[in-house]
Image (spheres, rainbow, N blue to C red):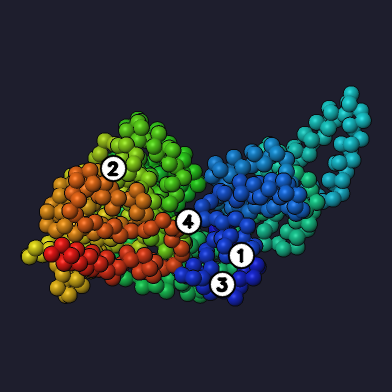
Amino acid sequence: MGNQAYAHKLLTGRAERFHTLRQRGGLSGFTRRDESEHDPFGAGHASTSISAALGLAEAKRHRGEPGRVVAVIGDGGLTGGLAFEALNHAGSLERDLVVVLNDNGMFISHNVGAMSQWLSRRLSGPTFNMLRRRIKALLANYPEFGEKTLHWMRRVVESTKALFTPGMLFEGLNFQYIGPVDGHDLEALLAIFRNVRNLDGPVLVHVNTQKGRGLDCAERDPTRFHGVGPFCPETGEPLEDSSGPPSYTKVFSSALLREAERRRDVVAITAAMPDGTGLAAFAERFPDRFYDVGIAEEHAVTFAAGLACKGLKPVVAIYSTFLQRAYDQLLHDVCLQKLPVVFALDRAGIVGEDGPTHHGLFDLSYLAHMPGMTVMAPADEAELVDMLHTALEADGPVAIRFPRGRATGASVADSPNLLEIGRGRIVYRPLRKPDACILTVGAALQAAMEAAKSLKLEGHEVVVADARFRKPLDLGLIDRLCSMSNVLITVEENVLEGGFGQAVAGYLCDKGMSGVRLRRVGVGDAFVPHGSQKSLREELGLDAEGIKAAVKQMLAAESNSSIRGA
């Protein structure tokens, strides 16, 4: 379980630290093996629990350890293909595995009638299961009609269950299905689980719950309260300041609506996150051109490729971290076929409190080495609007990555501009010869500009440039910067390995520009923990002070080198 970990943490000795949840140095928002012995497996992305639990169960069998393994999965997580792959494998192994399906109505229809509840108790109870075992053993002594009788009995039980329960899918995968059970009836749950503990083979317990149960505002609007910051429990209103520029997500949402009004071939795809990706407004305005494929990122990408094959312009709106799950589909189904699919990567860079499973710190690396892929990174909302427009005019795959949080307040033109692919810009250039140049990609530009202003007060002049594109690189811009100063600093919210700075370094090396001193500012070879965006950027040296410090270190090294040379 991942998104369902909060109650688990409260019950396993972490209640006193619960106020530190998702804060730097505090409890993670998900299960973590290094946080508690009660977290046997780390989680963060959906649909993984059954696979992990089956692996744990098999390991226990090999080691001769007692006990059963229980996997908890939500109905949303069950839309992922990984979950069904695991169910299929578990059913074929016939191990003692319990899967608890927490169904809050997002995937499987409700069916919690009195007959269903009664049947669940009886079919999981010791009397029925003892009788079933004895009859099976008795009929084994009469092979001439025993198998036919057993088959007939199974059909009767299955037909009875199918009449009152929605579990035939799981029965077909060789799971004993129990449910649906009222997930808010503790007495009923305890009775079911006591019975299930003694059953042999894989068992699935279907539990119906209400999302947001116990908090009026969450019950009324469960989608909005899926993931929230601090809010007033009486009103449900957020406590954070709502003034200021719109979020990048809202800017993207509005821009996509305008593009869809302009051209009828634009369609939008999300993997179970229409609100988080800003596509809810698109779905309302263009329901026939909107597709929510569930937690099925691989399918989303190949589905988009199929749409593009017939002349449509699919826009796949997805969090950067979740697109990692569709690497093969990106490479072979989209890039190899040179299909014009647009990927809008929200939550790129440092995401914050959700931690290492949700930071979008790898996309500049894993996308850029795909042949034919164009990778854009807007520095502000104006560039985001222009880049979406440009991407929809492109004849090949394009990815646009933008961060979580509020935009910069930049002025957005009434009509979007068509950008030249692979062309960056110089944002600030001093009047005198600069001491160094800073080349940023994406939203890191804002921190670089602050660093430049602070350096100017200390007597250091620097050029600040916005690459706009991770791929293709603006080689002409790099040459211009190197002609202004032999000190160059690249800044990116991405891992350094395979990232933007490494691409710049490769170009300089290939061109034999050994006189240029390059410093790459980004994320090193480690997973970034959870914490606020501000605190994590400070810690990683990706804020204005960190960039300023990197420039000063390079200037000091250059000065020392000059002194030694003299």
Which amino acid type corresponds to the residue marked 2 in the rendered image? Answer: Thr
Residue pointed to by mark 3: 18
Mark 2 or mark 4, which is nearer the start of the sequence? 4
Q: Are marks 4 and 2 in contact (CB under 8 Å)?
A: no
Mark 3 or 4, which is nearer the eye? 4
User: At label 1, which amino acid type do we have?
Assistant: Ser
Closer to the eye: label 2 or 1: 1
Residue 374's disc is 2
Residue beneath disc 1: 36
Q: Earlier in the sequence, mark 1 or mark 3?
A: 3
Task: Specify the amino acid type for callout 4.
Answer: Thr
- Give the SS element for disc 2: strand
Of the pair 20 and 232, the residue shown nearer to us: 20
Dot 1: within a 10 Å radius of its alpha carbon, few (fewer than 14), some, or many (20 or more) residues?
Answer: some
The quadrant of the image that shows the N terminus is bottom right
Disc 4 target residue? 357
View extreme (top): residue: 144
Q: Give the CA distance from mark 3 to mark 4.
A: 20 Å
In this view, the mark in front (1 or 3): 1
Count of numbered marks: 4
Measure the alpha-carbon separation of dots 2 and 3.
43 Å
**Between marks 1 and 4 in the image, the one whose residue lies nearer the viewer:** 1
Q: Secondary structure at mark 1?
A: loop
Q: Are marks 2 and 1 in contact (CB under 8 Å)?
A: no
Q: Residue at x 14, y 58 (%)?
A: 485
Residue 409 lies, in percent from the top left, at: 24, 64
Q: Quadrant of residue 304?
A: top left
Residue type marked 3: Phe
Can you see residue 220? no
In the structure shown, which secondary structural element does the residue marked by tag 3 occupy? helix
